[in-house]
C-alpha cells in the first residue's frame, strides 16, 4: 500500500536519490545516501528522513539492483515506526526511453496471503468512467478504495481494473488489481480482487446475490479456492497487472 517517486541526483550531489513516499498513513520525504559496503550484499544506500523536530533520522537501507532484463531498480527496506516494510523503485518503459531520472515507488510483491474469512465489504458501480467505489474491512483494518479501469491491459491475463486508495495528502496509491470472472456453475459474472495489505495479500470476490442482481451493488465475500472461476487472479503488481 505504497506509492511515490525518487529522482536520481546529479553525480556531484552528496545525496544519490531524493523523493517522497506515500501510504494510507503517511507522506514522507526521503533521501538515499551512499554508504560504504562491507560485502557484496551489503546495502548501497542509507534511507533518511526528517522527523517532526527537523532532525535527520535513518529509517532504512536500499540496494541498487538489476532485474533479469537488465533494468535498474532500487530495493528499499524502511521502518518509520510502524514496523518494517519493503518497496521497489522502478522505471516504466516510457521513462527509460526518455532517459528520465524518475523512479516510481511500488509495493514489494508479498509472497504470503492473509486469511479472508472474517471480511465485510461492498462495491458500487459508478455512473461514468467504468469505475467502482467500495470498501473492505475486518477487525484489524478498514479500507476505502476505487476500482479504476486498467488502461494498460493488453493480454487476457491482465486485470480489468487497478485498485486505488489515497494517502493523507490525497495522493493516489495503487493497492491491488481486480479481474472480471464468471462462475462455472451459474454463469454469473463477478469481480475477483487481489489487495496488498501490510499483513499480506488479501483475496476476495465481489458478487451479487439474488436481490442485488441487475443492480449496481456487489457484496465482498471471502475468496473460496474451489476452481470456480475462468482465470486465476494471481498476476500481482506491475505496470499492466
Image: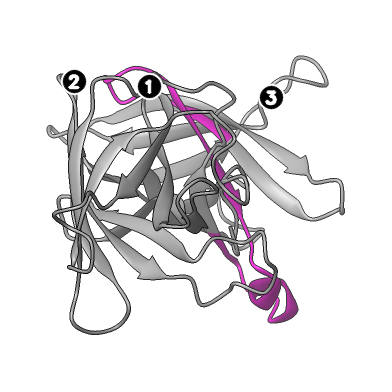
Q: Quadrant location of the C terminus?
A: bottom right
Whether residue 60 can be seen here: yes
Distance between the alpha carbons at the discs numbered 2 and 1:
10 Å
Colour scheme in use: one colour
User: Which portion, as a residue range, is magenta?
Assistant: 76-103
Q: Earlier in the sequence, mark 2 or mark 3?
A: 3
The kind of secondary structure element at disc 1 is loop
Q: Quadrant location of the N terminus?
A: top left
Distance between the alpha carbons at the discs numbered 2 and 3:
40 Å
Q: Earlier in the sequence, mark 2 or mark 1?
A: 2
**Residue 143, position in %: x, y?**
19, 41
**Residue 224, position in %: x, y?**
45, 29
On the image, numbered disc 2 is attached to which residue? 140
Label 1: how many residues lie within 10 Å, few (<14), some (14-19) or many (20+)?
few
Q: Looking at this view, is 178 or 96 the one in front?
A: 178
The kind of secondary structure element at disc 2 is loop
Placement of 236 over or under 174, stated as above or below: above
Q: Looking at this view, is 160 or 107 the one in front?
A: 160
- Whether the residues at callouts 2 and 1 have beta carbons within 8 Å, the answer is yes
Q: Earlier in the sequence, mark 1 or mark 3?
A: 3
Residue 41 is a magenta residue: no
On the image, numbered disc 1 is attached to which residue? 199
On the image, numbered disc 3 is attached to which residue? 36
- From the viewer's perspective, tell me whether residue 9 is left or right of residue 59: right
Amino acid at each position: 500500500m505504497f506509492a511515490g517517486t525518487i529522482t536520481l541526483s546529479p553525480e556531484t550531489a552528496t545525496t544519490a536519490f531524493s523523493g517522497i513516499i506515500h501510504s494510507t498513513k503517511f507522506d514522507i520525504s526521503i533521501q538515499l545516501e551512499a554508504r560504504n559496503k562491507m560485502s557484496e550484499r551489503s546495502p548501497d544506500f542509507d534511507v533518511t528522513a526528517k522527523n517532526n523536530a527537523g532532525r535527520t533520522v535513518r529509517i532504512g537501507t536500499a540496494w541498487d539492483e538489476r532485474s533479469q532484463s537488465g533494468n535498474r531498480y532500487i530495493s528499499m527496506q524502511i521502518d518509520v515506526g510502524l514496523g518494517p516494510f519493503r518497496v521497489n523503485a522502478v522505471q516504466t518503459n516510457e521513462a527509460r526511453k526518455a532517459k528520465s531520472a524518475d523512479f516510481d515507488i511500488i509495493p514489494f510483491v508479498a509472497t504470503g496471503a492473509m486469511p479472508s474469512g472474517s471480511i465485510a465489504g461492498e462495491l458500487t458501480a459508478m455512473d461514468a468512467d467504468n469505475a467502482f467505489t467500495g470498501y473492505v474491512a475486518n477487525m484489524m483494518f478498514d479500507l476505502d478504495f476505487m476500482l479504476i479501469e486498467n488502461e494498460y491491459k493488453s493480454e487476457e491475463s491482465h486485470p480489468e481494473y487497478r485498485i486505488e486508495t489515497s494517502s493523507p495528502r490525497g495522493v493516489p496509491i495503487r493497492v491491488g488489481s481486480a479481474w472480471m470472472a464468471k462462475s462455472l456453475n451459474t454463469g454469473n459474472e463477478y469481480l475477483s480482487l487481489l489487495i496488498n495489505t501490510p499483513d499480506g495479500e488479501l483475496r476476495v470476490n465481489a458478487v451479487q446475490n439474488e436481490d442485488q442482481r441487475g443492480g449496481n451493488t456487489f457484496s465482498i465475500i471471502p475468496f473460496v479456492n474451489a476452481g470456480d472461476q475462468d482465470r486465476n487472479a494471481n498476476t500481482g503488481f506491475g505496470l499492466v497487472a
